[in-house]
Amino acid sequence: MGILHGTAHADLVPCGQALNNPCQLSDLSTLAFNIFNFLVFSVAVPLAALAITIGGALVILQGINANFLATGKNLIWSAVIGILIIFASWLIIHEIARLLGLPGA
């Protein structure tokens, strides 16, 4: 019972948590998709939301500094374009994997 044995990794690792469920080679693609989904939805989306929030705050505070408006608008557009690129890559990867019949897609 090590530090990694518990529920923290249970959603990412699809196998090996019980003796009657050993890992197979097909579980590797499921693990890769779980990690990719985690990075997209649990890391990229909150970071984009934070960037949009900070950009909005800069736009609101433009009276303090004239550069805040341009910086805020640039930050908002960069976050929106970045999240669109990430979602497009997620969609392309999942569609290719689904067409190939990979498990976990």
Image (spheres, rainbow, N blue to C red):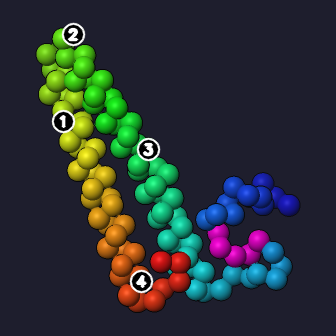
Residue that protrudes farthest toward the top in the picture:
64
16 falls in the magenta region: yes
Q: CA distance from mark 3 to mark 4?
A: 26 Å
- Residue at which label 4 appears: 98
- Of labels 1 and 3, earlier in sequence is 3
Q: Where residue 89 appears, x then y in whole percent?
A: 32, 66
Cα separation between marks 1 and 4: 36 Å
As shown in the figure, which amino acid type bears the numbered disc 4? Arg
Does the magenta stretch mainly form a helix, a strand or a loop?
A: loop
Three-letter residue code for mark 1: Asn
Query: In this figure, which residue is indicated by the disc labeled 2?
Result: 64
Residue with the mark numbered 1: 74
- The secondary element bearing badge 4 is classed as helix
Label 1, label 3: how many angstroms apart (C-alpha)?
A: 18 Å
Residue at 27% of width from left, 56% of height from top?
Answer: 84
Rendering coords of residue 7 (x, y %)? 73, 58
Outermost residue toward the right in this view: 1
Q: Amino acid at mark 3?
A: Pro
Magenta-drawn segment: 13-17
Is disc 1 in contact with disc 4, using a CB cutoff of under 8 Å? no
Q: Which disc is residue 96 wearing?
A: none
Please determine whether, in this image, residue 51 is positioned above or below residue 24. Answer: above
Q: Position of residue 3 (x, y in %)?
A: 78, 54
Give above or below for 71 relative to 3.
above
The label number, if any, that marks residue 46 in the structure image: 3
Between the C-alphas of marks 2 and 4, the distance is: 51 Å
The vertical placement of 88 against 92, above or below, is: above
Q: CA distance from mark 2 to mark 1?
A: 17 Å
Q: Is residue 32 magenta?
A: no
As helix, strand or loop, the secondary structure at mark 1 comes to helix
What amino acid does circle 2 point to? Ile
